[in-house]
């Protein structure tokens, strides 16, 4: 009889790809994917703890499984990811939800299958949270779910210790995969028909730093040199490590998308210093100017935090000013979330919630108006779109242009995985709508 798994993923792209790896391991154990958690034999929660709401969301959903587990005693519930890796959280989770069968950390992906097999033989919960051993995952067979797009990890962990961020504590120090393994994975994906590859790391720019291996720009160049029509993207770039060489490589290689995610976090020098970001607002702007000198049409997207401890009205105005002057294609905006164990959690002058709320509303309004201004300029233009899927609600195909804008268009036959020229007829926020002009 078929056995089924269901995975709930929280947080970033890194986690989405990690869930694909977990899915690959569950396939090896004989499980098949299923859409509804009620129908599965094993439910996995791949959690995130970067902000408190991501954590609460996961806790809430795990809590809701109590009834289902009581009715389906053989069902296995496994919880892993960043949340469980935090000091004391696994014990906390076990106490609160004793019906969770397997609790594993971010450094346990290599032995995830063993943990499941161990649980199948035991009545007790299996809890294993390893410390980082500098592990690098190789040779997994991710069950990819996002054709024609595919993700490849190039680094794990982070060394930056931005004062608000919990990632270095739950993902360990930065380590890089060997370039030959990354290039081989990219070659295989392209040979198998994938059309867009995104290289993933907390800070891709410091890839293989201090080693004999290729630098990040060299790695990009080597992947872009693989035969075939495909797009290459990467995420995330720390502004302090964004180099002229990288801007040049983007400019010279048409397969590398003219789109860079460059988190600024704040426009205030005082706050950037307190965040331990290691650049000033002027230096950040200079990096965007350098990038645009080489790649004039480059889409720059960013992450911004409001309400960091000590953020004054003027500091916040400096962030608004950054948004006014840089011309971001879009921005992810966050209210600062206090994370226990980080340096910022101990800082005085935490900003009151109502002040942060008012600031984020104002910031979102400005970011959206800038995005709309840019989108409006696309009307009447033709862009190349890689079709990614079909939107049931809109009854239209959808895909992205090189700059990462979502484009919707009608079509009679399935064109997922094809590059198409689409003439834009209207814009709505960051998404565009149009009609195919070829084929
Ligand atoms: N509070 C709010 N936002 C955060 N981020 C990381 N840590 C926090 C935090 N404690 C944001 C940063 C980062 C993005 C992935 O999440 O903007 O770039
Ligand atoms: Fe967190 Fe900073 Fe590392 Fe990004 S670079 S993961 S924000 S510590």
Image (spheres, grey):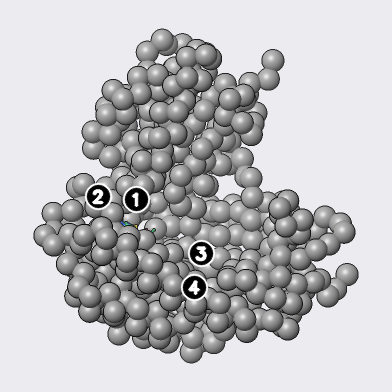
Q: Which residue is mark 2?
A: 339
Mark 1–mark 3 Cα distance, whole angstroms, equals 20 Å
Tell me the element at label 4: helix
Mark 4–mark 1 Cα distance, whole angstroms, equals 24 Å
Q: Can residue 212 be seen in this snapshot?
A: no
Q: Could you say which is closer to the camera, residue 124 or residue 335?
A: 335
Residue at (42, 11) in percent of width and height: 122
Question: In the drawing, what numbered circle is on residue 50?
Answer: 1
Residue 319 position in % (x across, y down): 32, 76
Q: Which residue is mark 4?
A: 368
Residue 407 position in % (x across, y down): 68, 67
Circles 1, 2 touching at the beta carbon (< 8 Å): yes
Please tell me which of labels 1 and 3 falls first in the chain.
Answer: 1
Tell me the element at label 1: loop
Please tell me which of labels 4 and 1 falls first in the chain.
Answer: 1
Question: In the drawing, what numbered circle is on residue 234?
Answer: 3
């Amino acid at each position: 009889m078929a056995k089924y798994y269901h995975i709930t993923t929280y947080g970033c792209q890194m986690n989405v790809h990690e869930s694909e790896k977990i899915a690959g391991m569950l396939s090896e154990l004989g499980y098949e994917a299923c859409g509804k958690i009620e129908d599965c034999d094993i439910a996995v929660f791949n959690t995130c703890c970067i902000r408190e709401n991501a954590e609460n969301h996961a806790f809430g959903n795990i809590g809701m499984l109590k009834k289902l587990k009581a009715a389906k005693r053989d069902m296995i519930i496994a919880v892993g990811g960043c949340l469980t890796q935090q000091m004391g959280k696994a014990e906390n989770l076990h106490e609160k939800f004793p019906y969770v069968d397997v609790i594993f950390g971010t450094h346990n992906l290599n032995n995830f299958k063993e943990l499941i097999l161990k649980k199948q033989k035991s009545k007790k919960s299996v809890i294993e949270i390893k410390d980082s051993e500098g592990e690098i995952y190789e040779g997994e067979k991710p069950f990819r779910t996002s054709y024609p797009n595919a993700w490849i990890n190039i680094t794990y962990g982070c060394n930056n210790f931005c004062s608000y961020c919990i990632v270095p504590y739950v993902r360990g120090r930065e380590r890089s995969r060997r370039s030959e393994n990354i290039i081989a994975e990219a070659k295989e994906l392209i040979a198998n028909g994938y059309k867009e590859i995104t290289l993933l790391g907390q800070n891709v720019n410091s890839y293989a730093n201090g080693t004999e291996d290729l630098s990040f720009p060299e790695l990009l160049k080597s992947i872009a040199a693989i035969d075939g029509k495909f797009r290459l993207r990467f995420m995330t770039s720390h502004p302090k490590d964004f180099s002229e060489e990288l801007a040049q490589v983007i400019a010279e290689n048409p397969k590398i998308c003219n789109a860079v995610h460059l988190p600024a976090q704040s426009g205030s020098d005082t706050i950037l210093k307190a965040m331990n970001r290691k650049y000033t607002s002027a230096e950040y702007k200079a990096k965007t100017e350098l990038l645009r000198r080489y790649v004039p049409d480059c889409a720059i997207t960013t992450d911004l935090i409001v309400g960091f401890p000590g953020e004054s009205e003027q500091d916040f105005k400096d962030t608004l000013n950054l948004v006014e002057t840089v011309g971001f294609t879009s921005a992810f905006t966050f209210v600062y979330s206090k994370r226990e164990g980080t340096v910022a959690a101990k800082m005085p002058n935490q900003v009151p919630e109502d002040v942060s709320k008012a600031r984020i509303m104002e910031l979102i309004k400005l970011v959206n108006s800038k995005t709309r201004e840019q989108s409006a300029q696309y009307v009447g233009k033709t862009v190349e779109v890689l079709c990614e899927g079909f939107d049931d609600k809109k009854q239209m195909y959808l895909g992205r242009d090189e700059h990462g804008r979502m484009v919707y268009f009608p079509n009679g036959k399935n064109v997922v995985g094809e590059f198409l020229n689409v003439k834009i007829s209207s814009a709505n926020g960051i998404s565009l709508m149009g009609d195919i002009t070829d084929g």
